Image (cartoon, helix red, strand yellow):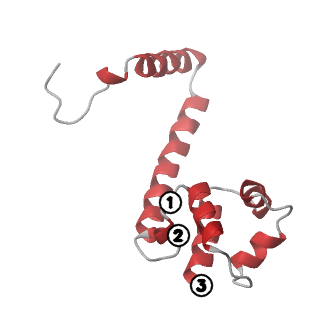
């Protein structure tokens, strides 16, 4: 069960959440229960494991360390880093460039079937 507690802490940090943030998402009154869970000082029920998995968007088995949570963490970190880089580029762009990006994103949302995918030769 120790892997479960380590994974909860790792996923919380990956999401840039405080213990207080996670406590609120889980329905706890304050951060003390999250601190105890991450330290492995309390056992949590199967229902709470499922709830934690839903909050983090992972499979309960992965959360418990039964499967490839490490790969998920690495992939999430890489994706998070890419997203952060794109946000920084956008924020540092001129208003004109931001306007172009905004219009492209709106267009992509209005026409999702026209977004490109590898191997698509229908165009």
Q: How crowded is mark 2: few (under 14 residues within 10 Å), some or many (20 or more)?
A: many
Position of residue 107 measured from the top left corner of the image (x, y, whole percent): 43, 16
Of labels 3 and 1, earlier in sequence is 3
Q: How crowded is mark 3: few (under 14 residues within 10 Å), some or many (20 or more)?
A: some
Q: Are marks 2 and 3 in contact (CB under 8 Å)?
A: no
Identify the residue position indicated by label 2 in the image: 63
Q: Residue at x 73, y 82 (%)?
A: 42
In the image, 108 versus 53, the foreground residue is: 53
Label of residue 38 in the image: none
Q: Which residue is drawn at 69% across and 83% down?
A: 40
Identify the residue position indicated by label 3 in the image: 2
Asked which secondary structure carries label 2, the reply is helix
Q: Which residue is drawn at 55% across and 81% down?
A: 3
Q: How crowded is mark 1: few (under 14 residues within 10 Å), some or many (20 or more)?
A: some
Q: Do the residues labelled 2 and 1 touch (CB within 8 Å)?
A: yes
Query: Distance from label 2 to label 1 (Cα)?
Result: 7 Å
Residue extending farthest right: 29
Q: In this view, does 18 lie to the left or right of 111?
A: right
Asked which secondary structure carries label 3, the reply is helix
Identify the residue position indicated by label 1 in the image: 58
Q: In this view, does 78 lie to the left or right of 25?
A: left
Asked which secondary structure carries label 1, the reply is loop
In the image, 57 versus 101, the foreground residue is: 57
Within the image, what quadrant is residue 18 found in? bottom right
In the image, 37 versus 93, the foreground residue is: 37
Of labels 2 and 3, earlier in sequence is 3
In the rendered view, would you say 118 is above or below 57?
Answer: above
């Amino acid at each position: 069960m120790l892997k479960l507690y380590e994974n909860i802490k790792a996923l919380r940090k990956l999401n840039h959440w405080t213990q207080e943030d996670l406590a609120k998402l889980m329905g706890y009154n304050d951060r003390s229960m999250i601190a105890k869970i991450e330290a492995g000082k309390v056992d949590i029920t199967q229902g709470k494991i499922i709830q934690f998995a839903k909050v983090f968007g992972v499979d309960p088995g992965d959360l418990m360390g039964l499967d490839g949570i490490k790969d998920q963490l690495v992939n999430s970190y890489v994706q998070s880093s890419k997203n952060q880089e794109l946000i920084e580029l956008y924020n540092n762009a001129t208003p004109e460039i931001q306007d172009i990006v905004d219009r492209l994103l709106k267009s992509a949302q209005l026409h999702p079937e026209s977004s490109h995918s590898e191997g698509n030769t229908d165009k």
